[in-house]
Amino acid sequence: MKPQGLLIVVSAPSGGGKTTICEQLLRHDRRLGRSVSATTRLRRGREREGREYFFVTPAEFRRRIKQRRFIEWARVHDHYYGTPRQAVERQLAAGRDVVLVIDVQGGLAVKRQYPRAVLIFVMPPSRQVLAARLRGRGTDTQATIRRRLQNARWEMDLAKRYDYQVVNRRLQDAVEQIQAIITAARLRVGIENKTKRRPKT
């Protein structure tokens, strides 16, 4: 029987680099699977259905909430985001580690349901750097950027409830640090499983 997979949550303020970091992790770690969230926001740039997100209408999203089809969901920046339950639990049951790229509200909701989940918060070096990154994306209005920066304050305050914090000063360093956390978590889980299977003497 395969051991249960490891659930890994990576969160950050908008513009903090969580998506880019996780793309690199998934590219180089074959044991990692990804969860594609559902959202009610419109597509950006070259985003594709089922790759970055599943894009649904607000009415459809609310229907799925009532059907308990999300592990977690939240309204963030005037849009709904949620993690589909069935796809994640199917991967975990098959022994695959799954990374969730979600906001802080969602991360804490996951921890309540899956106490062994590993929560990692990616911190920007400063608010000034975060603002510069948001403006550099060229995808948001000034009003949206101001709102995202306001939300970043309470998101970073809630980060103290996470298991780990990694400061994203340099992308490659942040990727390596998070990979080290995942490796350590796998070893810890492996030891727990071996202890459970140890025969009585």
Image (cartoon, helix red, strand yellow):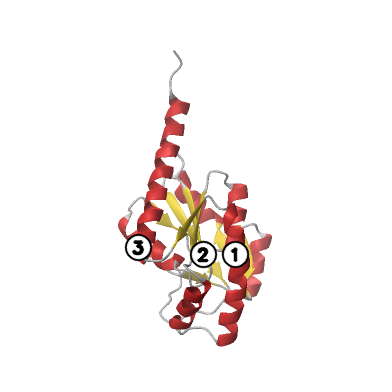
Provide residue 180's location: percent of width, then percent of height.
37, 50
Which image quadrant: the C terminus? top left
Vertical order, 167 against 135 (above or below): above
The answer to which image quadrant residue 137 occupies is bottom left
Provide residue 73's location: percent of width, then percent of height.
62, 62
Q: Nearer the viewer, mark 1 or mark 3?
A: 1
Label whose residue precedes the other's in the sequence (1 or 3)? 3
Which image quadrant: the N terminus? top left
Label whose residue precedes the other's in the sequence (2 or 3)? 2
Residue 70, visible in the rendered structure: no
| Depth check, front residue: 24 or 17 | 17
> Which amino acid, by three-letter code, is at mark 2?
Ala
Q: Mark 1–mark 2 contact, CB under 8 Å?
A: yes
For image coordinates 35% across by 56% down, the residue present is: 176
> Which amino acid, by three-letter code, is at mark 3?
Gln
Provide residue 25's location: percent of width, then percent of height.
36, 58
Give the Cα distance between marks 1 and 3. 23 Å
**Marking on residue 24:** 3
Q: Secondary structure at mark 2?
A: loop
Provide residue 19's location: percent of width, then percent of height.
44, 67
Instruction: Tell me: 115 left or right of 178.
Output: right
| Depth check, front residue: 34 or 150 | 150
Vertical order, 81 against 31 (above or below): below
For image coordinates 47% across by 44% down, the residue present is: 93
Give the Cα distance between marks 1 and 2. 8 Å
The residue beneath circle 1 is 155
Q: Secondary structure at mark 1?
A: helix
Residue 85, visible in the rendered structure: yes
Give the Cα distance between marks 2 and 3. 16 Å
Q: How busy is the neighbourhood of tag 2: few (under 14 within 10 Å), some, or many (20 plus)?
A: many
